[in-house]
Image (spheres, rainbow, N blue to C red):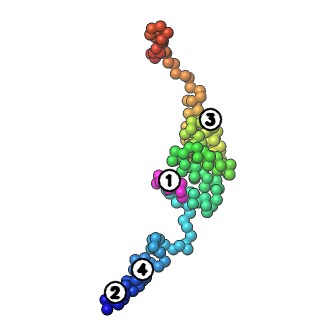
Amino acid sequence: MVARLTAILGSFLLLAGCASTAGFFTPAAGAYAPAGVDPSAPAVDGLLVGHRLMAAEQYELALKSYLRAAVTQGLNAEVLSSLGSANLQLGRLGQAETLLRRAVSTDETFPAAWNNLGVVLMEQRKYAEAERVFRTAFALDSGESAEIRENLRLALANLQKDGYAEPEQNSFALQRRGTGEYQLLSQ
């Protein structure tokens, strides 16, 4: 009798474990998807999401969103420029430069890519090339962007400061300290 009662109770528990879990999860959502998500709906544009994440200073997440956009849209100039901008904000100057140069070669008429490339070059203290790149961006934009105009102005100022400024006049003196030893003194 006890064995039969145990078997019935075991069968009941086994069937209870196989019962529907509609009380916990909605059937359309599944165990891991949030309720109310329509999996057949079109995805949100990865570039749009990435731009919003960049504005919120979430650069790593923006980079991931731009990579998703690259999968759906391909590596066009806008996607490459966005990837380069995210890498620039993350301090990955080499990767940013490579991506932005690809963006510029993909579409030579895209002023944003030229401007972002100029910013990378400025960060690397390549002022002469940055000035040339900003001039290209300025011409393509017809001088309408205040940001590009300001970047060009900064590149010109750095170029003049770096290349044409008078060297500082430091006066140094040597002081003898024993036989064959000298100490350099600045005045």
CB-based contact (under 8 Å), mark 3 and mark 1: no
In reply to whether residue 63 is colored magenta, the answer given is yes
Give the left or right position of residue 85, taking residue 106 as reference.
Answer: left
Label 1: few (<14), some or many (≥20) within 10 Å? some
- Residue numbers of the magenta segment: 56-65
Number of the label disc, if any, that sits on residue 149 = none
Find the distance from the CA under tag 3 to the CA under tag 4: 66 Å
Q: Amino acid at mark 3?
A: Ala
In terms of secondary structure, what is the magenta stretch mainly? helix
In this view of the protein, can residue 178 be seen by the observer? yes
CB-based contact (under 8 Å), mark 3 and mark 4: no
Find the distance from the CA under tag 2 to the CA under tag 3: 87 Å
Find the distance from the CA under tag 2 to the CA under tag 1: 57 Å
CB-based contact (under 8 Å), mark 1 and mark 4: no
Task: Determine the residue positioned at 47% across, 52% down.
Answer: 57
Judged by depth in the image, the label closer to the viewer, 1 or 4, is 4
Q: Look at the image and tell me in which quarter the C terminus lies.
A: top left
- In the picture of the structure, the residue carrying the numbered disc 1 is 60
Nearer to us in this view, 73 or 13: 13
Q: Position of residue 174 (x, y in %)?
A: 48, 12
